[in-house]
Image (cartoon, grey):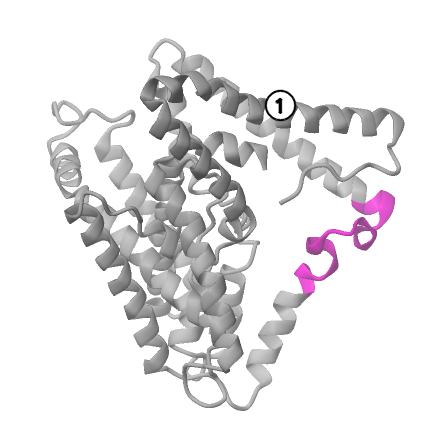
């Protein structure tokens, strides 16, 4: 897709190569596992090919989060020192005071844990769920900025699938089953396709200019309010005008029922899943493999692969846009090889033009449909 090709042109070559190479490797792995009928886990709860790759990917995903915190340990130490010393500390160079940010993080965490507990989870399970949720959105926020690939989605969404796979439901009460299902649904902290939290750190970039800060604040509030109320009112209007199930959207057809049907299925089934050491082993292997890739990347100058590719090998973004990223990698590799940095800079407007042209085309198509085809619009933009 043109926006993917245009935006990922700014991405490093090793990340681009890793995205499509690991996706290609995942296709072969999944096909081989399905072909030979290999499974992992106890009888009655074996992990199929997709779940095996999911566990491996999530292990690598968690490693990326821990590694990101480790390499930023010096900065984090200065942040805590600035928070302790107060706003007058010379180390407090953030856009908002570090003390204010840490207090807000602490209070928000207490609120979220309390809210999740109130939804039905026990305190240990609530803490585990919130930790996995933080890992998911922190990692997505960081590596979206690092890659320019805006279609990065959390592996296993908020971690509920991993809790189910590794720990099992045998020790869960009905209240915990329902609470875990609701927390990991699209009703809690944004849809998994467009996570709410990862976008928030990037909004702070708008405040980097001191002269425009006040204007930008009010612009953001105005844009949010306008879009929120317009979307809400238009959704209600569509439901009454066309009947929600006639819109052909998953959220109105099956998505709102499948969640509750699955909860009932888990509660009534006689043989509930239990803790599975074999699945834990696959998850740990994902952590170790990502660690090995990171070690090679830092110690071997010519090493071409990034552990991001392993972490996102089966995510929806990689599954859909691996070929687009292959095209970007091929073009950028040839440009840098034969023209170097000067040619790279000269060609860059062309890739930005792909993004602008695609968005403009979608806007014009929507305008044409609104004027001449209001009842039979044309499908223009999708995955």
In this view, the residue in front, 352 or 315, is 352
The structure residue drawn at horizontal position 13% and vertical position 35%, both measured from the top left corner, is 78
Image x and y of residue 289, in percent: 27, 62
Which of the image's four quarters has the N terminus? Answer: top right
In this view, the residue in front, 35 or 74, is 35
The structure residue drawn at horizontal position 37% and vertical position 61%, both measured from the top left corner, is 58
Image x and y of residue 370, in percent: 82, 28
Location of mark 1 (residue): 357
62 on left or right of 316: left
Prevailing SS of the magenta stretch: helix
Sort mark 1 into few (<14), some (14-19) or many (20+) by Cα contacts within 10 Å. some
Which of the image's four quarters has the C terminus? Answer: top right
Q: Residue furthest top?
A: 211
The structure residue drawn at horizontal position 62% and vertical position 30%, both measured from the top left corner, is 227
Which image quarter: residue 166?
Answer: bottom left
Q: For the image shown, how many numbered marks are present on the structure?
A: 1
254 on left or right of 122: right
Image x and y of residue 47, in percent: 46, 78
Q: Is residue 244 magenta?
A: yes
Image x and y of residue 292, in percent: 22, 59
What segment carries the magenta color? 239-257
The structure residue drawn at horizontal position 52% and vertical position 36%, both measured from the top left corner, is 4
SS label for mark 1:
helix
In this view, the residue in front, 10 or 201, is 10
Which image quarter: residue 366?
Answer: top right
Residue 224 appears in view: yes
């Amino acid at each position: 897709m043109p926006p993917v090709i245009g935006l990922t042109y700014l991405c490093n070559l090793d990340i681009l190569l890793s995205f499509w190479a690991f996706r290609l490797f995942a296709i072969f792995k999944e096909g081989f596992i399905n072909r030979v009928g290999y499974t992992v886990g106890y009888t009655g709860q074996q992990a199929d090919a997709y779940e095996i790759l999911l566990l491996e990917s999530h292990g690598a995903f968690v490693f990326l989060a821990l590694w990101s915190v480790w390499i930023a340990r010096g900065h984090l130490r200065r942040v805590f020192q600035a928070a302790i010393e107060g706003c007058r500390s010379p180390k407090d160079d953030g856009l908002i005071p570090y003390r204010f940010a840490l207090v807000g993080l602490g209070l928000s965490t207490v609120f979220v844990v309390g809210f999740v507990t109130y939804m039905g989870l026990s305190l240990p399970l609530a803490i585990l769920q919130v930790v996995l949720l933080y890992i998911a959105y922190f990692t997505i926020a960081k590596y979206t900025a690092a890659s320019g690939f805006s279609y990065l989605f959390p592996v296993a969404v908020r971690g509920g699938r991993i809790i189910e796979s590794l720990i099992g439901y045998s020790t869960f009460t009905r209240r915990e089953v329902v609470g875990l299902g609701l927390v990991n649904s699209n009703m809690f902290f944004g849809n998994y396709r467009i996570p709410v939290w990862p976008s928030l750190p990037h909004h702070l970039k708008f405040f980097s200019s001191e002269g425009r800060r006040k204007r930008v604040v009010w612009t953001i509030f105005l844009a949010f309010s306008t879009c929120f109320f317009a979307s809400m009112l238009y959704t209600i209007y569509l439901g009454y005008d066309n009947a929600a199930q006639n819109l052909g959207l998953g959220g109105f057809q099956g998505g709102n029922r499948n969640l509750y049907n699955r909860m009932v299925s888990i509660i009534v089934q006689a043989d509930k899943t239990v803790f599975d050491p074999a699945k834990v082993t696959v998850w740990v292997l994902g952590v170790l493999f990502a660690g090995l890739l990171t070690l090679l990347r830092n110690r071997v100058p010519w090493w071409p692969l990034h552990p991001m590719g392993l972490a996102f090998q089966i995510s929806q973004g990689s599954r859909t846009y691996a070929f687009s990223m292959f095209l970007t990698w091929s073009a950028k590799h040839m440009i840098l090889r034969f023209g170097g940095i000067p040619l790279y800079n000269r060609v860059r407007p062309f890739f930005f033009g792909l993004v602008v042209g695609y968005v403009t085309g979608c806007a014009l198509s929507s305008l044409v449909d609104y004027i001449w085809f209001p009842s039979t619009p044309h499908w223009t933009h999708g995955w």
